[in-house]
Image: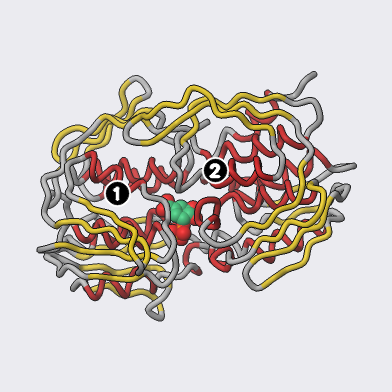
Amino acid sequence: MPGDKSISHRAVMIGSISDGLTEIDNFTTGSDCQATLQAMVSLGVEITRSQGRLLVHGRGLRGLRTPPGPLDAGNSATMIRLLSGILAGQSFESIIYGDHYLNKRPMRRIIEPLRMMGADISGVDDEYPPLRIRGGDLRPIRYRTPVPSAQVKSAILLAGLYADGTTTVIEEVKSRDHTERMLQACGAWLQSCRSEAGFQISIRGNPALSGQRVVIPGDISSAAFFLVAALLVPDSEVVIEKVGLNPTRSGIIDVLREMGGDISVENTDEISGEPVADLVVRSSALKGTTINGEMIPRLIDEIPILAIAATQADGEVLIAGARELRKKEADRISVMVENLNRMGGKVRELPDGMVIDGVTPLSGALIDSAGDHRIAMAFAVAGLLARGETRISGWEWTRTSFPEFLKILNSLRSG
Ligand code: S3P
C-alpha cells in the first residue's frame, strides 16, 4: 500500500518545523500530500529526494519564510486545517486556498480556536477558504472540540507549539492520534488522559523539535478497498503487507471481523511509533451489524466501502452517529445512498447515517462520484460484484489519495 496519507502530511509539516533532517520513506504519491510538500517549499523549506526517500531540511520552529504567493491546498482539508495551525504561529501573513470542493468545507471549527489563541485569521463568511492568517506568539487555551476531529485537534496542538504555556484539547470521542505520536517522537512534551470530560491532550509550547527518520506505514484507508473486495469476491485470498494499524484507525478490521470476515493479522510490528502488520484476507459470508458511537471516528473514512460490504451482508447494517460524513469531500451519506440505490441496493438515508439491507444483488449503473476519491474507489469494488457494467464519473479524483489503485486492482485478476 502507498504510505498513509494522514501520516505523510504530518511528516512533512512537522519535519519542516523541526531542527535538522527528517528522512521519510514510503511517502504517499497522492496529490493531497503533494500540495503539502509544495506549500512547505513555498514557506522556505528545502525538500529533496534521494533513492526514493524524501528529505525535509527542517528550519526549526521559527524558521519559515513569507511565501511568495497564496498557498494551494488543492482538495485537501487535512492540509489546510493542519497548516493553519502552524501558520497561526508565524508573524507573517499567508493565504491558503482550495479547489472548488475544498472551498465549500467548514473552517469555522479551526478559525474559532486559533483566534482564541491570538491569531488573526479570517475566511469567507468566517467559514470557508481562502483563509488569511497572520499570527505570532500565541496564548495557550483549553478547548473542547465541537466535533471529534483530528484535523481540528491537530491544528490546535500545532498552534500550541507557538504558545507560551500548556495548550489542552478535549474531545468527546478520541480521534486519530498521529500528530501526538509524531510530535512526541520529535521531542515535544505531550500528555494525554481519559477523564469524565472526555479525551484530553495537552502540549507544552516552545519545544525544540528534532528531525527524525520516518517510515510511513501502508494506508489502512487504501487497504480497506482490497479488504472488502477480497471478502466479497468468491475464492479470493489477498495479503496486504505493512499496513498501519493505529487503534484510532483500525475500526474497519474490527467491524469486518464482527461481520464474519476472515481477516488475520500477522507479523505485528511498530515502525516510527506506529503499529503495523500484514493482513491476510479471504472470501467470507458476512452478516449485519450496527456501527455507531466511539467506533465512528475509528473508521470514518472507510464508511463508503463498508456500505458496499453491507449490501452483501445477511441482514441489516445500521450506520449512525456519523453526521460528519456530510462534511467530507462530498456529502458521503447522500451520495452513497443515491448511488447504491441506483445499483439495486436497499439503502435508507438517515440524518446521521444509513440503513442497508442485504444480501442484495447489485447491477451495473452509472455512478457519480461527486468528485470524491473514496466514493469512486468504493464503487469500483461494487462494480466487481455487479451484473453488467459500472461506469464511474470523476475517476480522476482517485489521484488525491491513491493513484495506484487501478493498477493494483488489475494485478489481482486471476486470469
Ligand atoms: C484526517 C482526519 C479526518 C479524516 C481525514 C483525515 C486527518 O477528518 O476524515 O480524511 O488526517 O487528520 P476530521 O478531522 O475532519 O474528522
Inspect the image, locate mark 2, and give the three-letter code of the amino acid beneath it. Ser
| Residue 75 visible in the displayed image | no
Give percent across and percent down for residue 254: 59, 43
Q: Dot 2: few (<14), some (14–19), or many (≥20) neighbours within 10 Å? A: many
Viewport quadrant of the C terminus = top right
Q: Position of 49 compared to 363: left or right?
A: left
Q: Which residue is mark 2?
A: 221
**Quadrant position of ligand 1:** bottom left
How many numbered discs, if any? 2
Identify which amino acid the numbered label 1 is placed on: Glu
Q: For disc 1, does the CB lie below 8 Å from ligand 1?
A: no
Ligand 1 contact, mark 2 (Cβ < 8 Å): yes
The residue tagged with tag 1: helix, strand or loop? helix
SS assignment at label 2:
helix
Q: Residue furthest bottom?
A: 125
- Which dot marks residue 180? 1
Taking the image as drawn, is residue 412 in sight?
yes
Residue 386 at x, y percent in the picture:
85, 43
**Lateral position of residue 161 relative to residue 85, left or right:** left
Q: Is residue 391 left or right of residue 95?
A: right
Q: Is residue 206 above or below residue 181?
A: below
Q: Which residue is at a point 29% across and 64% down the rendered structure image?
A: 169
Marks 1/2: CA–CA distance? 20 Å
Q: Residue at x 40, y 57 (%)?
A: 150
State the residue in front, 196 or 391: 196
**Of circles 1 and 2, which is in front?**
1
* Residue 401: image location, x then y, percent: 52, 43
Q: Return the residue nearer the eye: 40 or 240.
A: 240
Query: Measuring 61% from the left and 24% from the top, which residue is drawn there?
Result: 239
Identify the residue at image location x=59%, y=61%: 292
Local packing at callout 1 (Cα closer than 10 Å; few below 14, some 14-19, many 20+) is many
